[in-house]
Image (spheres, grey):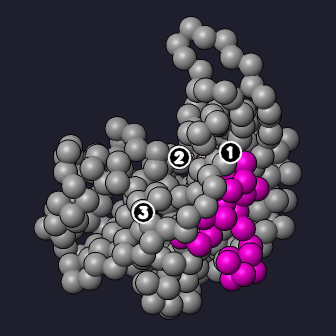
């Protein structure tokens, strides 16, 4: 079983700031770092570091071939990654002293895929393989439709939440990985407790598995019959960028090895607790050995 990840490759510019910049304000940053990021690339790296077999489908500018080398060095299969003329996607990330962040995204090459490009990239995928999707590349709705037609299993992390999500055929998704804010937006509800949202998920998506990340409270797995919750590890948080991506990569790697849902949740929580202790996106993702040693 292979995991195909149709996902973004971003160049992240990370600025440590005393507070997040306010409208009209000019602010000096105290530290700057440029790293490989993008939810897609981060999740592929986390999957590979966790020992899964992952093929990344993505694009970046010719001048950024270093990003592809980093993916390959982590163990990601990059045969379906293209170097193109369009500028690479990038993110301007501010991280304040409380580890809060704010992100400005530029889609660039991530948004250049046509429906035909996606179909072509998935030509080698066969029934039972997984397609992993986030929401930083073009035509995610069509990718879901096409993957279902090929009988692939679809895992969707609908982040960042944009208006186009309303057009996604969520009923075709096997596994949805979301945080509480994203879930309340999907359900189009405000002020519901987590337990109330879980009840709504069961009613509206009876065939779907849903993993909800709860930050410092851990994570839970919900479907029509099960409700499994695990605690988070208590750590000193420096930067939460890519914590969700790390969680998802280690969770999916455990699923691909057919480990239990509880074991998969624990692997995700362990790995993300290590990621938040370091500044950066892909550079903060731990190895399987570091996670095992925790
Ligand atoms: O999830 C973190 C990622 O979100 C960053 O690496 C940035 O590129 C944005 O896509």
User: What's drawn in magenta, residue-wise?
Assistant: 269-294
Q: Earlier in the sequence, mark 3 or mark 1?
A: 1
Residue name at image x 49 percent, y 55 percent: 134
Marks 2/1 in contact by CB < 8 Å: the verdict is: yes
Mark 3 vs mark 1: in front: 3
Q: CA distance from mark 3 to mark 1?
A: 29 Å
Residue name at image x 46 percent, y 50 percent: 159
Label 3, residues with CA under 10 Å away: few <14, some 14-19, many ≥20? some
Expressed as whole percent of the image width and height from the top left, the position of residue 52 reads 64, 80
Residue 10 has which mark?
1
Kindly identify which residue carries mark 2: 136
Expressed as whole percent of the image width and height from the top left, the position of residue 10 reads 68, 45
Label 1, residues with CA under 10 Å away: few <14, some 14-19, many ≥20? many
In the image: residue 208, left or right of residue 13: left
Residue 217 has which mark?
3
Magenta portion: prevailing SS class? helix
């Amino acid at each position: 079983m292979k995991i195909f990840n149709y996902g973004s490759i971003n160049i992240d510019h990370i600025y440590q700031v005393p507070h997040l910049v306010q409208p009209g304000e000019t602010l000096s940053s105290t530290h700057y770092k440029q790293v490989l990021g993008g939810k897609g690339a981060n999740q592929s790296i986390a999957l590979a570091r966790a020992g899964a077999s992952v093929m990344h489908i993505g694009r970046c500018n010719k001048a950024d071939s270093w990003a592809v080398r980093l993916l390959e060095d982590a163990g990601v299969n990059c045969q379906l990654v293209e170097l193109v003329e369009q500028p690479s996607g990038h993110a301007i990330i501010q991280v304040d002293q409380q580890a809060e962040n704010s992100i400005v995204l530029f889609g660039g090459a991530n948004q250049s895929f046509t429906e035909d490009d996606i179909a072509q990239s998935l030509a080698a995928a066969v029934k039972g393989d997984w397609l992993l999707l986030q929401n930083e590349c073009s035509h995610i709705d069509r990718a879901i439709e096409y993957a279902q037609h090929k009988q692939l299993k679809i895992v969707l992390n609908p982040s960042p939440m944009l208006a186009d999500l309303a057009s996604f055929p969520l009923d075709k998704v096997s596994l949805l990985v979301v945080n509480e804010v994203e879930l309340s937006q999907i359900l189009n509800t405000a002020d519901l407790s987590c337990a109330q949202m879980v009840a709504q998920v069961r009613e509206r998506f009876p065939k779907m598995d849903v993993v909800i990340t709860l930050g410092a409270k851990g994570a839970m797995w919900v479907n029509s019959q099960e409700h499994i919750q695990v605690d988070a590890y208590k750590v000193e948080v420096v930067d939460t960028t890519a914590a969700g991506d790390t969680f998802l990569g280690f969770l999916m790697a455990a699923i691909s090895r057919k480990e239990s849902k509880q074991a998969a949740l624990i692997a995700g929580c362990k790995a993300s607790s290590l990621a938040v202790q370091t500044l950066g996106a892909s550079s903060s993702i731990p190895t399987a050995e570091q996670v095992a040693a925790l």
